[in-house]
Image (cartoon, helix red, strand yellow):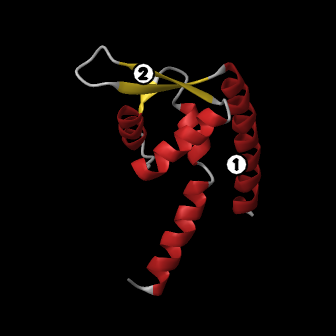
């Protein structure tokens, strides 16, 4: 891999890391389980590795931003995640921060 490709891969990963929490929270206003969350995000152009997603979901649950429930009615048990009321408030604040940052970035990039 060329030096430019390596640098771009590294920088792109840094950008993505900064948006993954907001991306995941945006999709959890109703219960989702991990696989469908990954699939839905990919369908919308946001690729997230399961090795990144599941630790993030557990961390957000420990922070009481998400809650989870097991569904054992199907052929195999599935753990569904959803934002808590506290998580809704955190999401709205992060969304506001995101909008401020993107507005500022747009101004910077237009100069």
Residue 21 has which mark? none
Front residue (pair 78, 47): 78
- Count of marks, rendered view: 2
- x, y percent for residue 77: 32, 24
Residue under pointer 1? 102
Query: Is residue 56 something one can see in this rendering?
Result: yes
Quick check: 10 left or right of 102? Answer: left
Looking at this rendering, what residue extends furthest in the bottom direction? 3
Circle on res. 70: 2
Give the image location of residue 78, x and y in percent.
Answer: 36, 26
Q: Is residue 98 above or below residue 106?
A: above
**On the rendered image, what quadrant is the C terminus found in?**
bottom right
Secondary structure under the numbered disc 2 in the rendered image: strand
- The quadrant holding residue 75 is top left
Please give left or right for residue 18 compared with residue 100 in the image: left
The percent coordinates of residue 62 (x first, y second) are 63, 35
Instruction: Locate residue 14 relative to residue 76 in the image: left or right.
Output: right
């Amino acid at each position: 891999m060329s030096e430019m490709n390596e640098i771009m891969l590294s920088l792109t990963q840094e950008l993505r890391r900064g948006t993954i929490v907001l991306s995941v929270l945006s999709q959890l206003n109703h219960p989702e389980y991990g696989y469908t969350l990954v699939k839905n995000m990919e369908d919308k152009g946001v690729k997230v590795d399961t090795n990144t997603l599941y630790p993030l979901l557990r961390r957000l649950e420990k922070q009481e931003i998400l809650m989870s429930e097991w569904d054992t009615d199907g052929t195999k048990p599935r753990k569904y995640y959803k934002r808590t009321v506290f998580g809704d408030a955190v999401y709205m604040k992060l969304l506001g921060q995101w909008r401020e940052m993107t507005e500022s970035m747009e101004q910077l990039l237009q100069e």
